[in-house]
Each structure stands twice: as C-alpha cells, then as structure tokens.
Image (tube, helix red, strand yellow):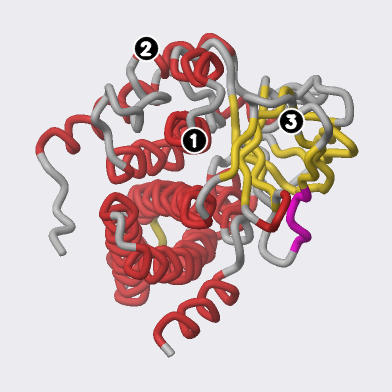
Amino acid sequence: MDLVISDEQEALAATVRDWLAGRTDLAAAHAERAGAPPWSAGDLRAAAELGLVGLLRAGEGGTHTDLALVVEELGYAASPLPLGQAGSVCRALDDAGIGGAAADRAAAGSALVVPVLPEPGEEPFRASEDEDGGIVLDGRAAVVVGALGAEAFLAVAGGPGGAPVFALVPADLPGVARTARTSLDITRDFAAVAFEGARVPAGSWTAVEPDAAERLRDASVLHHAADAVGAAGRLLAMTLQYVGERRQFDRVIGGFQAVKHHCADMAVDVERARVTVRAAARALDGGEPGARRLRIAEAAAIAGEACSRVAGTALQLHGGMGFTWEHDLHLYLRRVKTGELLGGTPRHHYARLMELVG
C-alpha cells in the first residue's frame, strides 16, 4: 500500500497548518468559558470557505485520507474545531439521503452537526417507530466531541427490527439534553448527550446497512487517532527545540546521548503512528470492509500507545518547565491522553485486532 501522500495533499496540509496558525489561540484554552464552545462561528465559516467541512461530499472530490491530514493539523495546532466530526457527518447524511438542507448548511459553515456515538461498552441508542412514521430515540452517550456548539446531531441507533438507523436530531428538540463535561483536555469541548423520548419525524431518519453505521464509527476512531498524531508531532517539535536551547554543564542538553536516544524514540513513535493512521484512512477510502476493520483497529491501538509515550517523554525532557501551567506542553499532553480514551482504548482495539486476525 502506497502511504506517500501526493503533492496536492502536501499542499492541503500546509495550507491548513498556515491557516490554523493564524486562527488558534492557545491562551484561550486557559480562559473560563462558562459552558460555551471554545471555537467561534466565524472560524467554522472560514473553515467551510476553505472547503474543509464539506471535503468528503461528492462534489468536492475529497477523500478520508485528505480529511485525516486536516485532522492531523488540527491536533498539531491544538485547534478546538471539530472538523473531522463535521466532515464525516456531511458525507453520511448525503449517503443516507436525509437532511439535505442540514448537510448543505453544515458544509457552508452555517451550522455544526456532529455524530453521537456511544463509546465501546456503552448501551447503544434505541429507536422505536411511532404511529406517524417517525421514531422515538432513547439512550445516552457519555462523551461527544463538539457537542456544546452543535445545532444538530447525527445519531446512530438500533432501529425497529434491529437494523441500524441514522437520525438527524436538532439539539433543541424536546427530549434532547446535553451536559457540558469537564475533561483533562481543555483545548476542546465535550458534552454528554441524552435522548429521552426524543421524537424524530419521518424524513429525518432512515434505516441503513450495518456497514454504513460501522463506517461512521470507524471514521470517528480514525479522527481521534489522526488528531493524536498531530499533537504528538507538535510535542516532538517543541521538545527538539527545547533540548537544542536548554544548557547544563555548559552544553545544550540535546547533545547528551541519553537525550538523543529519547528524541529518536519519540520520532520513531510519531512516524509509526502516522503510517498506521494513513493506512487506515486509505482502507476507509477503499471500501473493503475486512481491510478497513483491520487497519482502523491497528491505527487506534498503535497510534494511541505511541502518541501517549511521546507525550510522557516530552514532559520528562522538558524537566520542571514541562510541569508549569504557563507552558503549552501540558495542553498537548492533555489532548493526547484524552484522545487515547475516545472511541475505545488501545487495549480495546488490540482485542478487536486479535479477533479480526484470529
């Protein structure tokens, strides 16, 4: 499998990195937000104008590999924008044939729609059909990225007869509740989303093939891993700069053999994680379910562990400076450690990997 990205993809990543550098204020992560999302409507519209939200729609011609590169840059910048989630929803709505107007508004940056997927081990959402052709949703997802500022949710539920359904659920619909969650990661917003007898009318939901629901879950897992790769890459860059400047015994500490070895291990872990994530993105684009499941589990397990090691080593090599509130290192460490738990832990995905190859 060719894991080298094209010149166009290199240009996309560079454009997004430059754009995020002028749009991401890490100081804002320290500010008290009083339950408000950390991103602005203007930033979401600007991202949509660049084509980042609707990247996967048929008219745009983007791929999951392209979107994974965008999400990696979000992690590198510690951006609060949930573009991976929003981009996946636009594609899923188009494929399912529901929420055409909502998908158009989301792609234009006029509204944010994010997927609501229970974490592994949580009870799935339940959908029962009512007499008017709509469905009634019940259930709860403990952690949803980007939920605080979302105008609507794309919920995946077990429908009548056991077939999965996609339901477009307005955030202000009666029976929908979201509760801001305090997490280790202070660069993004998280909320619990609960449906208690939420009635979704006909036309806003549809039964889908099991593979469609699985693809949306796999895309979500991929974005968590890609974000972690970006954050780990930033930690590596920060650490290399620090050890090249910090002096002890009249020498820069980057000249010490032990420090060199740690930095080399960090670089290997970042590249290992990046390669597995790109392989998973290519498999998601490929359409072969067996290969996709294998690569997604592999990426989530390997990237989750590797990026976590990078974060821990970066903290150690920064010494006392790395423990301070004023230094940005802890923002990335928090993001990596939180991302390691989203969509299933590395242990969960290693177990899935063993089932797939066993």
Q: Given the image, on which type of amino acid does mark 2 rest?
A: Glu
Q: What kind of element bears circle 3?
A: loop
Q: Give the labeled residue for mark 1.
A: 96
Left or right, 295 with respect to 330, comes to left
Q: How far apart are marks 3 and 1 (CA)?
A: 17 Å
* Quadrant (top left/top right/bottom left/bottom right) for the C terminus: bottom left
How many neighbours does mark 2 have within 10 angstroms: few (below 14), some (14-19), or many (20 or more)? some
Q: Is residue 112 left or right of residue 37?
A: left
Q: How far apart are marks 2 and 3 (CA)?
A: 37 Å
- The one nearer the camera, 355 or 27, is 355
Category of crowding for the residue at label 3, using alpha-carbon neighbours closer than 10 angstroms: few (below 14), some (14–19), many (at least 20): few
Name the residue located 76 percent from the left edge and 38 percent from the top edge: 191
Give residue 49's mark. 2
> What is the x, y in percent for residue 25?
53, 23
The answer to whether 162 appears left or right of 89 in the picture is right
Who comes first in sequence, dot 3 or dot 1?
1
Q: Are marks 2 and 3 in contact (CB under 8 Å)?
A: no
Residue range highlighted in magenta: 122-126
Against 320, residue 35 (above or below) is: above
Q: What kind of residue is marked 3? A: Gly
Q: Is residue 47 visible?
A: yes
Residue 343 locus on image (x, y percent): 59, 57
> Label 1 crowding class (10 Å Cα cut-off): few <14, some 14-19, many 20+?
some
Above/below status of 47 relative to 340: above
Marks 2, 3: nearer the viewer? 3
Residue 133's mark? 3
Residue occupying image coordinates x 72% and y 67%: 121
Q: Residue 54 lies in magenta, yes or no?
A: no
Q: What is the CA distance from the residue labelled 2 to the residue labelled 1? A: 24 Å
Q: Please, what is the three-letter code of the amino acid marked with disc 1? A: Ala
Q: Quadrant of residue 82?
A: top right
Residue occupying the far bottom of the picture: 358
